[in-house]
Image (cartoon, rainbow, N blue to C red):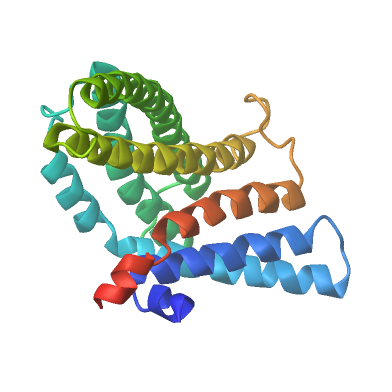
Amino acid sequence: MDVVRLLESHRGRDKIVRLATYACMLLSGNGTGKFHKRMEILVRELGGCRTVLRLFDDLPMLASNYMYGTGSKEKNILVRACRLITNLAYQVFFPVEHVAWLNDKGVISGFVSAKWVVGSIALWAIALMADIIRCIARISSIKTELRELKKQQILASEERNELSEDSVTIKEQRRKLIEELQETYLTLIQDGGDFMNAINWMPPGFLWAGYFSRSSSGIFGLISTTMMLIKAWPKKSNQKAA
């Protein structure tokens, strides 16, 4: 089953836990009854579970950033700059969150947990904003590339047989770009939902901080997580190959 296949990996399991967390947040709402309190307990415990698991994300993030490097292969300067900002923000986010968690649990002392929590949320918001800009820039770039390939495809079909090598190559390039475009749109929606929550959880007075209810945060989180699951869902071709 696809769900089982997803749960077999750490990343896949984290997305399912994330989905459950935001679902419980939506159900908890702003009520004070027994049901709402039970949902709040689940939100805290599931959120705490994800926080503990993120204690081990520093090295994978560092490895990913090392592989990307300075993004010298990226032609679009804006996309490259945004990707570097996102990578740096996420790399710093983890140790900042670790300090907040360790201090909150009494493992270390001398830190004000609330300030470190706000710092981690701010870094998350910066990473999301940079990635939103990257997605918009990349979508614009892909659309331009698709228009150029469309022109080449028309010329190729007029000059040669449509099954010529050039025509087949152009079709393959278009297919890959369309797939990337679809995934980038999903990422944009995902980042948008998370960004709404990130700002909402900042100290009151900053933009729309504190404006949304728990149910609203649950909805934004569910939208974001759904986009994640769509992107991570096992592809049919992969299942057949397995």
Q: Is residue 28 visible?
A: yes
Residue at point 31%, 50% (across, down): 95
Task: Tell which of 173 and 68 is nearer to you.
Answer: 173
Q: Quadrant of the rendered structure where residue 90 is?
A: top left
Q: Is residue 233 above or below residue 146?
A: below
User: Residue 92: x, y in percent?
Assistant: 30, 41
Quadrant (top left/top right/bottom left/bottom right) for the N terminus: bottom left
Q: Quadrant of the rendered structure where residue 232 is?
A: bottom left
Count of marks placed on residues: 0
Q: Is residue 219 above or below residue 241?
A: above
Residue at point 86%, 60% (across, down): 31
Quadrant (top left/top right/bottom left/bottom right) for the C terminus: bottom left
User: Residue 96: x, y in percent?
Assistant: 36, 46
Q: Is residue 107 visible?
A: no
Task: Tell which of 67 and 208 is nearer to you.
Answer: 67
Q: Is residue 57 above or below residue 185?
A: below
Residue at point 25%, 21% (across, down): 158
Task: Tell which of 67 and 151 is nearer to you.
Answer: 151
Q: Is residue 105 above or below residue 100?
A: below
Q: Quadrant of the rendered structure where residue 196 is?
A: top right
User: Residue 81: x, y in percent?
Assistant: 26, 23
User: Residue 219: x, y in percent?
Assistant: 69, 51
Task: Tell which of 151 and 9 is nearer to you.
Answer: 151
Drawn side of residue 99 relative to residue 83, left or right = right
Residue at point 52%, 69% (across, down): 17
